[in-house]
Image (cartoon, rainbow, N blue to C red):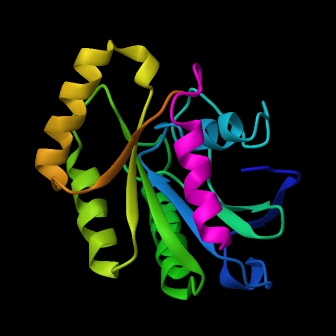
């Protein structure tokens, strides 16, 4: 995929702030600190397009990234653990729910799961919920550089047994760029 222009198009906390132009959207979801921002930065060779942090819960808004005016990546706040108040977490949950219910242009969900661990209960709940929407889904197993290849393959197989044998998956590392080409192929398919 030949990418010429990627930009942060909108930062939203409510539907009135969503971009108005219709583009097919890939939605990134995953636990806090799983690597959604790192996936964006690594895929587009940008260091700080999406802000990363070692502190869970850094993304507190819905961030819309426009890719060449043909596809949009939507980065949702992380679910699960984050050093935020219960009130803030409730606001995030409502914000995410509002987006997904109003997201007329969603063409694929990308759920990120840390390859070093089995899916959490929150991961499983989100996976089942996404499947119930009837929209294609890919699981991106992040931080693949943190463990050996054999263990990575074993962990992916264990996760697939818990989530469903036939899920489409990508092993990804922001450090080595493993999986970037497969992620960009998903974007390219949405262009057509």
Count of numbered labels shown in the rendering: 0
Q: Is residue 54 magenta?
A: no
- In the image, taking residue 29 as reference, residue 120 lies left or right, namely left
- In the image, taking residue 49 as reference, residue 122 lies left or right, namely left
121 lies above or below 157: below
54 lies above or below 59: above
Is residue 76 something one can see in this rendering? no
Q: Residue at x 38, y 63 (%)?
A: 137
44 lies above or below 85: above
Q: Residue at x 67, y 83 (%)?
A: 15
Quarter where residue 191 is shown: bottom right
Q: Is residue 181 magenta?
A: yes
- In the image, taking residue 22 as reference, residue 94 lies left or right, namely left
- Magenta region, mostly helix, strand or loop? helix
Q: Residue at x 29, y 24 (%)?
A: 152
Bounds of the magenta span? Answer: 174-192
Is residue 36 something one can see in this rendering? yes
The image shows residue 2 at horizontal and vertical percentages of: 79, 49
Quarter where residue 145 is shown: top left
Of all residues shown, which one is farthest toward the right? Answer: 5
The image shows residue 4 at horizontal and vertical percentages of: 88, 51
- In the image, taking residue 136 as reference, residue 24 lies left or right, namely right
Quarter where residue 19 is shown: bottom right
97 or 130: nearer the eye? 130
The image shows residue 72 at horizontal and vertical percentages of: 70, 66
The image shows residue 149 at horizontal and vertical percentages of: 32, 17
Looking at the rendered image, the quarter that the C terminus falls into is bottom right
131 or 149: nearer the eye? 149
Q: Residue at x 67, y 34 (%)?
A: 42
Of all residues shown, which one is farthest toward the left? Answer: 161
């Amino acid at each position: 995929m030949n990418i010429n222009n990627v930009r942060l198009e909108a930062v939203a906390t409510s539907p009135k702030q969503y971009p108005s132009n219709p583009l097919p959207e890939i939605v990134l979801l995953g636990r806090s600190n799983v690597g959604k921002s790192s996936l964006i930065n690594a895929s587009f060779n940008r260091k700080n397009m999406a802000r990363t942090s070692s502190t869970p819960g850094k993304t507190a808004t819905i961030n819309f990234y426009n890719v060449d005016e043909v596809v949009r990546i939507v980065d949702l706040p992380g679910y699960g653990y984050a050093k935020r108040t219960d009130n803030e977490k409730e606001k995030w949950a409502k914000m995410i729910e509002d987006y997904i219910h109003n997201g007329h242009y969603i063409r694929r969900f990308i759920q990120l799961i840390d390859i070093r661990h089995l899916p959490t209960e929150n991961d499983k709940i989100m996976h089942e919920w996404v499947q119930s929407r009837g929209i294609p889904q890919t699981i991106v197993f992040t931080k693949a550089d943190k463990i050996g290849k054999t263990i990575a393959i074993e962990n992916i197989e264990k996760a697939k047994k818990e989530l469903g044998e036939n899920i489409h998956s990508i092993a990804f590392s922001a450090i080595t760029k493993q999986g970037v080409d497969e992620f960009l192929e998903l974007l390219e398919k949405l262009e057509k």
